[in-house]
Amino acid sequence: MSATTFQYKVRDNLGKQHAGEMEAENRDEAAHKLRHDGFHILNLEEEEESLNLFPKRVKKSDIIYATAQLAIMVDTGITLSSAIAGIAEQEDNPAFRTLLNDLKNRVEGGEDFSSALAQHPKYFDKTFISMVKASEHTGTLGEMLERVATYLRNELETRAKVRAALAYPGVMAALAICVTIFLLTFVLPKFTPLFERKGMKLPTPTIIMMTLSHALIDYWWAWLVGGAVIGLTYWFGRKTVPGRKVIDWFKINAPIVGVMFRKVTISRSIRTLGTMIQSGVSMLEAIRLTSEVSGNIYYEQSWNRVLDEITQGNRICEALQGDPLFPKTLIQMIAAGEETGQLDFVLQKVSVYYDREVEMSLKTATSMIEPIMITIMGVVVGGIGLGLMLPIFQLSRGG
């Protein structure tokens, strides 16, 4: 069996860290050699996997599945490091297996699980880490991991529903653009010489179609540059505060889909806040995390304002009072939860309610978008067809 190169990061008995490479037939042999030399393994991974030009991605569904498995194993009395190792051995995705092995090594090295997760912010967000950290103080890691898995699963399902609802109009829009470009650049130019030879006076719709056709054919490079500029502006703009303000404002104020995006954002915020409070996370930390995961800069600003007012001694319902981004009924339910001391319970119920509202909004938006897109395609294709047929009708009448 050929030797494999492994990259390692270890700590000696004096606490000093060392990193390097070594060859071994498999990972167990490499780990045995390092432990035999008196080192405590912090990280050990196969070089071939890390140098893969096309590594497999760690999907959100992988994280959810592993978290649910981990919850069951920990609840049955299996140690955390052994549970992670067991999941890693069964994992086919090399990138995810490397991630799990790193978590195992860190836990075996004495790190808290939350601290180990914090070393991989790309895969474990602050909400995940805060919930695990809260469970470490109460000794309810298994229960908390199940709650995390449920939370992440709900988030993933909501995003999938939104994407599915927007996929149809996206495909229809792309199809309409492609058909329009094909008709204007390949079909219409075939008739242009005929019209010019006849020297006939062309109808206004035909003149407009021919002008657009010439613009697409003669200045195709300008259209490409314009498309690239718009794409890059959106790509980089969404990473800046002014750009995010424009994009997020449009999302929550756009016709038809604006209501849907508002409910999706509120559902995510309320679910996060309720889960955090129920998990034992402090109120201030829970609101801060809710702000970060809201996904919309305007809701983020609202939650930050709530955080400031909570710090000054006000209640959440008082801080949200008069905010146009939050329905009055929601504020009333939060107020009832705060007065009865059952805010976490109320928020969980509200999040379930808004999940249903999101589904209804998705169905409503889809049912409205479908006829609108069909009408737009009909108008575009029909307009181009009319521009072609009117001169032909004139020729057939001898005009």
Image: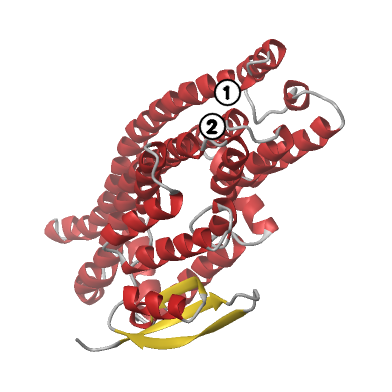
Determine the residue positioned at 66% across, 61% down: 240
- Please indicate, yes or no, whether residue 184 appears anywhere in the rendered image: yes
Residue receiving disc 2: 271
**Residue 294 or 44: which is nearer the viewer?**
44
Please provide percent x and percent y for residue 252: 57, 39
Name the residue furthest left: 396
Picture layout, residue 136 above or below residue 108: above
Mark 1 neighbour class, 10 Å CA radius: few under 14, some 14 to 19, many 20 or more: many
Between discs 1 and 2, the one toward the N terminus = 2
Q: Mark 1: which amino acid? A: Leu
Identify the image quadrant of the N terminus: bottom left
Q: Mark 2: which amino acid? A: Arg
**Residue 391 or 328: which is nearer the viewer?**
328
Determine the residue positioned at 64% across, 74% down: 15
Horizontal relation, residue 217 to residue 116: left or right: left
- Please indicate, yes or no, whether residue 376 appears anywhere in the rendered image: no
Please provide percent x and percent y for residue 202: 30, 63
Determine the residue positioned at 19% across, 73% down: 190
Determine the residue positioned at 34% across, 59% down: 88
Picture layout, residue 330 above or below residue 83: above
Query: Mark on residue 104?
Result: none
Mark 2 neighbour class, 10 Å CA radius: few under 14, some 14 to 19, many 20 or more: many
Disc 1/disc 2 C-alpha distance (Å): 7 Å
Please provide percent x and percent y for residue 209: 34, 62
Please provide percent x and percent y for residue 105: 47, 64
**Residue 133 or 341: which is nearer the viewer?**
133
Residue receiving disc 1: 347
Labels 1 & 2 near each other (Cβ < 8 A): yes
Judging from the image, the colouring scheme is secondary structure
Helix, strand, or loop for circle 2?
helix
